[in-house]
Amino acid sequence: MSGSQAAGSSGKAQKGRLTLYTWIITLGGFLFGYDTGIINGALPFLQSDFRLSALAEGTVTGALTLGAALGAVTVGQLVDRFGRRRVLFVLALLFSVGSAGIAFSTSLGMLISFRAVVGLAVGAVSAVVPLYLAELAPAHARGAIVTRNQFMIVTGQLLSYATNAWLGNVYLENESIWRWMFALSILPALALFLGMFAVPESPRWLLLLGRQDDALVALQRLEGSAGVQRLGEISASVSADTTVRTSTLADFFRSKKLLVLLLVGAGIGITQQITGVNALMYYGTQVLRESGFDTDAALTANIANGLISVVGAALGLWIVGRLPRRLALTIGLGGTTGSLVALALISGLAEGPSRAWLVLLISVIFLVFQQGLVSPVTWVLMSEIFPASARGAGMGTVTFASWLGNFAVSFTFPQVVAGIGLAPTFGIFAGLGVLAILFTRIFVPETAGRELG
């Protein structure tokens, strides 16, 4: 074998290892997707089993998002202190405990409490996984690698919808079938726990602690002999960061630069939520029932939302690495806002069987823009805008803001729809979409191709 052939073979092996490590880490994103999506089809059975009111329905759904907000805001300090890898080990176990607790819940209070426990894990991985991926990836591939997390989120949601449809249709008369829907998420949680034994710690975090030898070992596992050169590049970028070594939110208020980044990052996180995407992700079955489908047909039709989300995220794997971040986000928000206007008009004006199918069609178009552009770009941007010293706390805080937006949507949606109907509700989301476009054009920085600090 010639030297060039050996180098090529070595390069492929290194790329293969990095690919394997990143897909293992994104099992956290898969759990995020499954555990947020499973409520969509479980709600009809929970309503029957627990006789849920609109308020109770919003509480059961929102408990996860409120727990996620808390998980996101606290995990930043944990990953800065204990490392990205160790925290993911603990979160895998937390997913398992929370899912088992939901499956064996004997009261509404117990159900809500364990939903919040799973929410802690969901919120934490939503901050840790993009951060971890961004720190492992070389600059030229960072957008595509971080976007793998979004692909796994929607893959988890698709599997949850398919599970809902299968169990819900086969065991339609069994009010307690929702227990199996939640229990199945224990399997990917165990896969994440076992898989993390193979994944190296973030070299950037190790360098922040002054552990150069450990950072070099991690880089050699990631990039082979090229890891020596990369150690110098990363060391230089980390050393160029002159901000305070940040571990708490209070430190952001001592630096005007960090505070501005924090506010912009929070705005980016909220932008993802005010499109109303999670009204469809969590309540898609109810929206389709409201539009005219029967329960079993709505469960099956809702798989289309999950399938198109995966297709959109697969497109995002290709698009996000090729377009400037801000342009991609603007295009995505334009598509989602236009779709919301169409949903408002159809929900208010269409009648008969065609109404349900039109709502499903426009929902699918909405999700192509959301999952292909808006969601992946927001996660990439939030993982890129902070310097190394502030990345853990910063990412956790802006993800907290995103989850608060998610909670506001998930908690209020059933009550708003009950009060004013689907059409005005979608109209409100469309108006918020216009504001999100203006925010993006005015305040969001461009980060494509830039070396992380």
Image (cartoon, grey):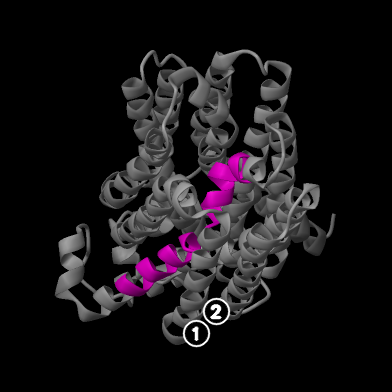
Give me the residue at 49% from left, 63% from top.
Answer: 272
Q: Check if mark 1's residue and mark 2's residue have beta carbons within 8 Å.
A: yes
Q: Give the x, y percent position of residue 349.
A: 68, 62
Toward the right, the furthest residue is 1
Which one is nearer the viewer's eye here, 87 or 102? 102
Residue 441 badge: 1
Residue 214 seen in the figure: yes
Residue type at tag 1 = Arg
Q: Which residue is mark 2?
A: 326
Residue type at tag 2 = Arg
C-alpha separation, residue under disc 1 versus residue under disc 2:
7 Å
Which one is nearer the viewer's eye here, 87 or 34? 34
Q: Give the x, y percent position of residue 206.
A: 35, 54
User: Tag 2: Cα neighbours inside 10 Å, few (<14), some, or many (≥20)?
Assistant: many
Residue 267 among magenta residues? yes
| Screen quadrant of the C terminus | bottom left
Which one is nearer the viewer's eye here, 301 or 48? 48
